[in-house]
Image (tube, helix red, strand yellow):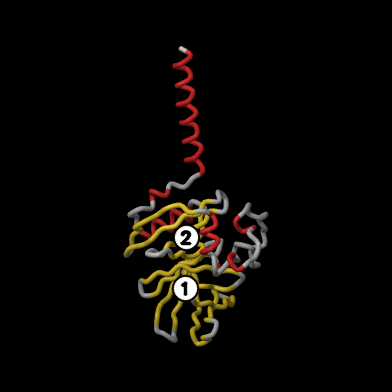
Amino acid sequence: MKKQFGILAIVMLAAGGIGATSAYAYDITTLRDAPADNGRRDLQASGFRYVGTYNDLSNEWNMWFNRGTGECVGFTQKGRKISRAKTFKTERCREADRGGYGHHDRDDHYGPPPPRHDDQDRYGDRDVPRWMVGNFSGYNRAYGLRVTLDISRDGDVVATTNGVRMDGRIRDGVLRVGPNRFTIDRDDDGFTTRQIGNERNEVHYRRR
């Protein structure tokens, strides 16, 4: 009887450990073979933010970090679908974050989040102003292209031009998409971006 009770206790402890892990760890298997757009939305909804890319010998990984849980995950993309997905150590997300937090000498961005502030009309540590959050469209006269920007509250950006999507982000009032950086100036009905180093590349965005 004691032996049976001991086995039952071990099974219950193991089940409890599994339950605790699943409550806090993101199930990375849900990303595999999923549409990339769905994967990004699912990661954002689960508290992750895009921090950059990491290149190993044969793959370019899109890296996402969850500040609340400390999880770092990445996926590779083939066409419009996710081909591989796995978890990484936090250090890998820190290394991928070259264009934003990675420029700072301190590591507090990968620790507990700071207190939130109600004044969202200023650039905060993570958040962007309320007037910049949402879905916007504009026309690039210099290149004759229609452009859309989808901006989240924590500054993650998806830019779409002629059906081609690129991930970007806003930090300290500067929009970064790929290797390019843009200043942002608020207008009465939206905002205007200008590429740093190529001022003729100017786009006025209005809310969709």
Q: Quarter-wise, where is residue 74 in the image? A: bottom left
Mark 1 Cα shell of 10 Å, populated few (<14), some (14-19), many (≥20): few
Count of numbered circles on the image: 2
The residue singled out by tag 1 in the image is 178
Indicate which disc residue 89 carries.
Answer: none
**Residue 30: % across, % down:** 38, 49
- Residue shown at the point (64%, 57%) measured from the top left: 108
As shown in the figure, which amino acid type bears the numbered disc 2?
Met
Please report contact status of discs 2 and 1: CB closer than 8 Å, yes or no. Answer: no
Q: CA distance from mark 2 to mark 1?
A: 14 Å
Q: Quarter-wise, where is residue 55 in the image? A: bottom left
* Element at label 2: strand
Indicate which disc residue 63 carries.
Answer: 2
* Element at label 1: loop
- Residue shown at the point (60%, 62%) measured from the top left: 126
Q: Is residue 115 above or below residue 103?
A: above
Considering depth in this image, is 3 or 117 the residue closer to the camera? 3
Residue 185 visible within the image: yes
**Residue 116: % across, % down:** 66, 56
Mark 2 Cα shell of 10 Å, populated few (<14), some (14-19), many (≥20): many
**Which residue extends farthest top?**
1
Q: Quarter-wise, where is residue 190 in the image? A: bottom right
Q: Is residue 151 above or below residue 21?
A: below
**Residue 98: % across, % down:** 54, 68
Residue 187 visible within the image: no
**Which residue extends farthest front?**
57
